[in-house]
């Protein structure tokens, strides 16, 4: 199983690399057209994509570090590097979102706006379609390999697709003699970037502080109760190492059971959690009932 996890991380690198290539191409297009066509919103969108390059590189580095085997300083492995990468990506995105907000709000209050060229709208539509395709690919990949970092990248991809659509709305509106709509849309773009950054930060920090979904814990408990010989579950806890789940559980068995039979029950509990829920590792403690 461990080798499969490493293989999944290796596969996750492909998603990060695709994101990096897409962001490099699209940011260059958006910034160039944004400046030549005089679109504040498209420039903001291009700046967002430029920073997404750095965030995607952070995800790629995190995925590679996660593949390092356990050593003397990291006896449990380097799995959490993937989550740290997601956290770093959220910081970068938040910094860009605040910068875009500041520039866009300043532009709104300056009150001197010109309608951007319509080519900037077509650019936004094209970029939105590309980013949505990248999002679909990364989301499928993240679900397949159960990668928090790749899923964070996918959320960023989707956010960028919506940002580009919002940019188009602002640019088209500016064509109907409401040029202030373009920088106003840039403000909305900034808020959207910040929200995505906050969502990724919240998930990553929840994992790093050993937070865990109570509903998933309940499903683990119900699965264990169905194992033959288990009389009850006294305690159960779970935590994440990157995208890997580790469960600590205390089960109750009959007090007169032979030690070998009790050990077999323990093995069956471990097997059921791994097979049914994809748990990476299980530590079972047995107490007499």
Image (cartoon, rainbow, N blue to C red):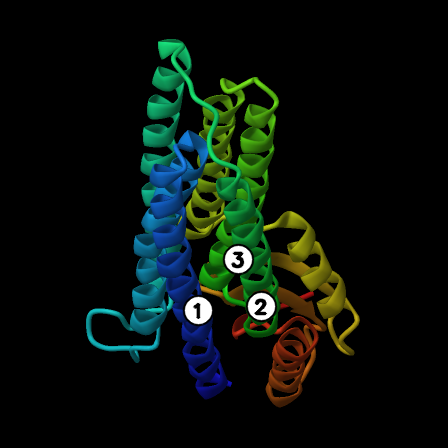
Residue 35 on image: x %, y %: 34, 38
The one nearer the camera, 92 or 131, is 131
Image: 114 above or below 196: above
Left/right of residue 97 with respect to residue 260 in the rendered view: left
**Mark 3: which secondary structure?**
helix
Q: Where does the C terminus fall, quadrant-wise?
A: bottom right
- Cβ–Cβ below 8 Å for labels 2 and 1? yes
Residue 242 on image: x %, y %: 43, 63
Query: Residue drawn at (53%, 43%), measured in percent from left and top?
Result: 164
Rendering quarter of residue 17 = bottom left
- Cβ–Cβ below 8 Å for labels 2 and 3? no
Is tag 2's residue or tag 1's residue first in the polypeptide sequence? 1
Image: 175 above or below 128: above
**Mark 2: which secondary structure?**
helix
- In space, the residues marked 2 and 3 are separated at their CA atoms by 8 Å
- Cβ–Cβ below 8 Å for labels 1 and 3? no
- In space, the residues marked 2 and 1 are separated at their CA atoms by 9 Å
- In space, the residues marked 1 and 3 are separated at their CA atoms by 11 Å
The one nearer the camera, 196 or 132, is 132
Residue 11 on image: x %, y %: 46, 79
Residue matched to label 1: 18
Residue matched to label 3: 154
Residue 91 shows in this picture? yes
Residue matched to label 2: 137
């Amino acid at each position: 199983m461990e080798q499969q996890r490493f293989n999944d991380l290796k596969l996750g690198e492909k998603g990060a690399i695709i994101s990096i290539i897409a962001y490099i191409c699209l940011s260059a297009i958006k910034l160039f057209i944004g400046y030549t066509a005089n679109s504040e919103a498209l420039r903001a969108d291009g700046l967002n994509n430029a920073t997404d390059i750095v965030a995607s590189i952070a995800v790629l580095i995190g995925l590679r570090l996660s593949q390092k085997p356990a050593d003397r300083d990291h006896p449990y492995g380097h799995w959490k590097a993937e989550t740290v990468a997601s956290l770093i990506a959220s910081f970068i995105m938040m910094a860009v979102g605040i910068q875009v907000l500041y520039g866009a709000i300043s532009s709104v209050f300056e009150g001197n706006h010109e309608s951007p060229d319509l080519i900037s709208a077509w650019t936004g539509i094209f970029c939105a379609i590309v980013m949505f395709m990248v999002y679909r690919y990364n989301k499928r990949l993240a679900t397949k390999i159960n990668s928090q970092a790749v899923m964070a990248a996918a959320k960023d991809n989707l956010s960028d697709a919506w940002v580009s659509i919002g940019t188009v709305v602002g640019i088209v509106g500016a064509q109907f003699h409401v040029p202030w709509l373009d920088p106003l849309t840039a403000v909305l773009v900034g808020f959207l970037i910040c929200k995505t950054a906050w969502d990724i930060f919240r998930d990553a920090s929840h994992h790093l502080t050993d937070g865990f979904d109570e509903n998933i814990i309940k499903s683990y408990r119900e699965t264990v109760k169905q194992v033959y010989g288990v009389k009850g579950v006294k305690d159960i806890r779970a935590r994440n190492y990157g995208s890997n789940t580790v469960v600590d559980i205390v089960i109750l068995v009959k007090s007169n059971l032979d030690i070998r039979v009790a050990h077999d029950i323990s093995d069956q509990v471990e097997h059921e959690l791994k097979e049914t829920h994809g748990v990476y590792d299980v530590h079972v403690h047995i107490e007499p009932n």
